[in-house]
């Protein structure tokens, strides 16, 4: 595989230069801002692994910036790997600290995401117009499933997860519309995916933070 081959996958990019996607590049600052805001909210509050989620959120911004500036195969890996890490870490956090599973069972339940994604992504790829967003489509479905499953046990957390699923669905819509609307909107809509996705990921950390604080025993 040629790790240095150029990738032109977004409406805003017209050539292979470093700043060919200025909006797609600079809007990755939203991930850093969301990570900083949530870091301050979770710092010193014993809501592990929320701090780790904040760190991964910042890395998502850095990886996406690399991809939208270098636009190469290696930068594409730097873009998607942190996102997968966030998904797996968040699933483990929910399985361990919301469902209350042992660490071993939480790891096992988290690992099920990989065959779940492998089975469902091809199904989403059959939907017309979804394009490369099919790779992300299983995630809001899974979040919605967790929200439904937790609706009686932890209704506030379930409501927060449902909101997160809705935010991610809207975010994916912006990502999906980038190419179809390119003729009418030359700057594309991918930068809106960054802004909405940063808000969504920050919100998901906030949902977890609130759950952990609400579950903490009252101190006399």
Image (spheres, rainbow, N blue to C red):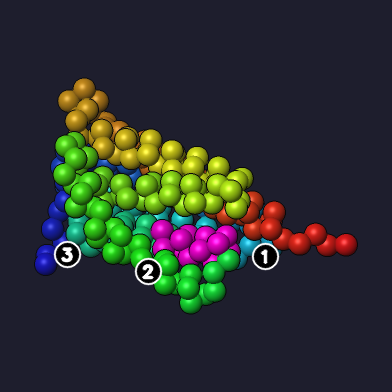
User: Badges 3 and 1: C-beta atoms under 8 Å apart?
Assistant: no
Q: Which mark is residue 28?
A: none
Callout 2: helix, strand or loop? helix
Q: Residue most toward the front? A: 152
Instruction: Return the residue nearer the eye: 20 or 89.
Output: 89
| Magenta segment boundaries in residue numbering | 87-99
Callout 3: helix, strand or loop? loop
User: Which residue is rendered at x = 88% and y = 62% of the image?
Assistant: 220
Q: Distance of mark 2 from mark 3, alpha carbons?
A: 28 Å
Residue on which the image places disc 2: 111
Q: Which mark is residue 46?
A: 1
Q: Is residue 26 above or below residue 76?
A: above
User: Which residue is rendered at x = 48% and y = 73% of the image?
Assistant: 105
Mark 3 Cα shell of 10 Å, populated few (<14), some (14-19), many (≥20): few
Work out whether residue 176 can be spotted: yes
Q: Earlier in the sequence, mark 3 or mark 1?
A: 3
Q: Distance of mark 2 from mark 1, alpha carbons?
A: 25 Å
- The main secondary structure of the magenta stretch is helix
Residue 96: x, y in percent? Answer: 54, 67
Total numbered labels placed on residues in the image = 3
Q: Is residue 47 above or below residue 16?
A: below
Residue 210 is a magenta residue: no
Instruction: Return the residue nearer the eye: 168 or 43.
Output: 168
Mark 1 Cα shell of 10 Å, populated few (<14), some (14-19), many (≥20): few
Callout 1: helix, strand or loop? loop
Q: Quadrant of residue 66?
A: bottom left
Instruction: Return the residue nearer the eye: 75 or 96.
Output: 96
User: Which residue is rendered at x = 25% and y = 53% of the image?
Assistant: 120
Q: Residue most toward the top? A: 184
Residue 166: x, y in percent? Answer: 43, 38
Residue on which the image places disc 3: 3
């Amino acid at each position: 595989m040629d790790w240095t081959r150029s990738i032109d996958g977004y409406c805003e990019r017209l050539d292979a230069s470093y700043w060919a996607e200025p909006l797609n590049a600079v809007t990755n600052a939203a991930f850093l801002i969301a990570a900083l805001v949530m870091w301050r909210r979770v710092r010193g509050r014993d809501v592990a692994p929320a701090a780790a989620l904040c760190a991964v959120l910042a890395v998502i911004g850095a990886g996406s910036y690399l991809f939208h500036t270098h636009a190469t195969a290696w930068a594409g890996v730097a873009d998607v790997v942190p996102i997968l890490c966030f998904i797996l870490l968040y699933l483990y956090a929910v399985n361990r600290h919301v469902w209350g599973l042992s660490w071993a069972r939480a790891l096992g339940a988290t690992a099920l995401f990989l065959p779940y994604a492998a089975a469902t992504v091809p199904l989403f790829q059959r939907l017309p117009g979804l394009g490369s967003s099919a790779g992300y489509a299983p995630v809001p479905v899974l979040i919605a499933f967790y929200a439904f499953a937790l609706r009686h046990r932890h209704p506030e957390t379930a409501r927060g997860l449902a909101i997160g699923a809705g935010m991610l669905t809207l975010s994916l819509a912006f990502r999906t519309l980038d190419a179809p609307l390119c003729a009418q909107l030359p700057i594309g809509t991918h930068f809106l995916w960054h802004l909405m996705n940063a808000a969504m990921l920050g919100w998901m950390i906030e949902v977890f933070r609130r759950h952990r604080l609400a579950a903490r025993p009252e101190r006399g």
